[in-house]
């Protein structure tokens, strides 16, 4: 990808140029700046913040105001990456008017450059309405975490065995519907890699995979999984490139040990009183 500011047309061009798109989630200024400096192309302010930042079991409790709050912090860190804001559960399902209103809030108040929403054929008209007012939309199909209760958990979708017959065809139909509706890219989450390869071949818009194997046009992961910022096991599809949880716990244990042992603060972290200067003495003498 180009070294200059990443744009929506740039993401679309990356597919024809066969350049892998690198995406990650972020939820605040420091990590967004780190991701941007690392050369990540797309930063998603995902509703996964409900789980990895807020500590909920699912993404469902996340509100529009919360995504906007986090998106604003992330957007302040942006230099090169494209910022995509996630529309949370309930913010686009009621009707298309609501969806356009909330998508506009993410652009206007959250300073995002595009929005993402979950679903295929069922939300195609909503995608079209948002795209019609020139807000770029990223789709998200397959394992859609906002449908956790329908799926009976965060389960891989579109598998021949263990899932309802025809599910694979339904995932393909969702992908085609999202493209037709005018999305500029689509996240493929939690589907078999051969299905992701088939969809990637079929679509002209880029596919961005998470738990969808190596044949997508790009990859996205949750920041906390990549950096090891959680004390639970990362999902099978994620790769942990660091252990920041362990690093941070070790650092705080060291801090606690030094305070308790009266090692910190040392003289080098402390201030000295200033010697009186002549004018101070004159003021004191007059008083
Ligand atoms: O909310 C999120 O972080 C996401 C990504 C996992 C694609 O939707």
Image (spheres, rainbow, N blue to C red):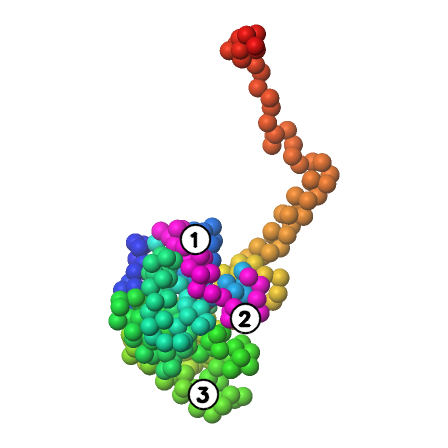
- Give left or right: position of 254 versus 137: right
Q: Nearer the viewer, mark 3 or mark 1?
A: 1
Label of residue 167 in the image: 3
Please tell me which residue lies in front, 88 or 263: 88
Dividing the picture into quarters, in which one does residue 202 lie? bottom left
Dividing the image into 4 quarters, which one contains the N terminus? bottom left
Distance between the alpha carbons at the discs numbered 2 and 3: 23 Å
Instruction: Kindly report the distance in space between the C-alpha atoms of the residues bearing marks 3 and 1.
Output: 38 Å
Give the x, y percent position of residue 157.
Answer: 48, 82
Q: Which residue: 29% across, 71% down?
A: 131
Q: Are marks 2 and 1 in contact (CB under 8 Å)?
A: no
Element at label 2:
loop
Classify mark 2 as within 8 Å of ligand 1 or not, answering yes or no: no
Closer to viewer: mark 2 or mark 3: 2
Q: Residues within 10 Å of mark 1 (few under 14, many from 20)?
A: many
User: What residue occupies the far bottom of the structure in this picture?
Assistant: 165
Res 42 quadrant in image: bottom left
Residue 26 is inside the magenta segment: no
> Quick one: label 2 or label 3, which is nearer the N terminus?
2
In terms of secondary structure, where does tag 1 sit? Answer: helix
> Residue placed at 54% from the left, 88% from the top?
162
Q: Which segment is the magenta one?
A: 54-79
Label ID, residue 58 = 2
Of the residues under marks 3 and 1, which one precedes in the sequence?
Answer: 1
Position of the C terminus, as image quadrant, is: top right
Q: Could you tell whether 133 is left or right of 86 in the image?
A: left
Q: Which mark is residue 73?
A: 1
Q: Residue 190 versus residue 96: which sits nearer the camera?
A: 96
> Can residue 82 be seen at all in this image of the molecule?
no
Residue 60 horizontal/vertical position (percent): 51, 71
Relative to residue 283, is residue 4 drawn left or right? left
């Amino acid at each position: 990808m180009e070294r200059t500011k990443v744009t929506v047309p740039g993401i679309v061009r990356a597919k024809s140029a066969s350049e892998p798109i690198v995406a990650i989630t972020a939820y605040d200024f420091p990590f967004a700046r780190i991701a941007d400096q690392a050369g990540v192309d797309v930063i998603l302010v995902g509703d996964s913040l409900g789980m990895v930042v807020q500590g909920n079991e699912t993404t469902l409790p996340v509100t529009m105001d919360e995504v906007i709050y986090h998106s604003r912090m992330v957007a302040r860190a942006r230099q090169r990456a494209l910022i995509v804001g996630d529309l949370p559960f309930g913010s686009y399902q009621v009707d298309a008017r609501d969806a356009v209103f909330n998508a506009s809030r993410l652009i206007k108040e959250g300073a995002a450059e595009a929005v993402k929403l979950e679903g295929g054929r069922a939300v195609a008209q909503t995608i079209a309405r948002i795209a019609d007012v020139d807000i770029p939309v990223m789709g998200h199909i397959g394992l859609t975490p906002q449908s956790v209760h329908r799926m009976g958990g965060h389960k891989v979708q579109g598998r021949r065995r263990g899932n309802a017959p025809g599910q694979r065809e339904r995932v393909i139909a969702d992908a085609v519907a999202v493209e037709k509706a005018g999305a500029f890219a689509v996240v493929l989450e939690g589907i078999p890699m051969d299905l992701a390869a088939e969809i990637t071949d079929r679509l002209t818009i880029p596919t961005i995979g998470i738990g969808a194997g190596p044949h997508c046009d790009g990859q996205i992961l949750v920041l906390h999984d990549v950096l090891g910022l959680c004390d639970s096991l990362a999902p099978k599809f994620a790769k942990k490139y660091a252990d920041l949880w362990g690093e941070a716990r070790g650092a705080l244990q060291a801090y606690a040990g030094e305070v308790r042992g009266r090692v910190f603060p040392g003289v080098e972290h402390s201030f000295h009183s200033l010697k009186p200067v002549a004018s101070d003495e004159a003021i004191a003498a007059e008083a």
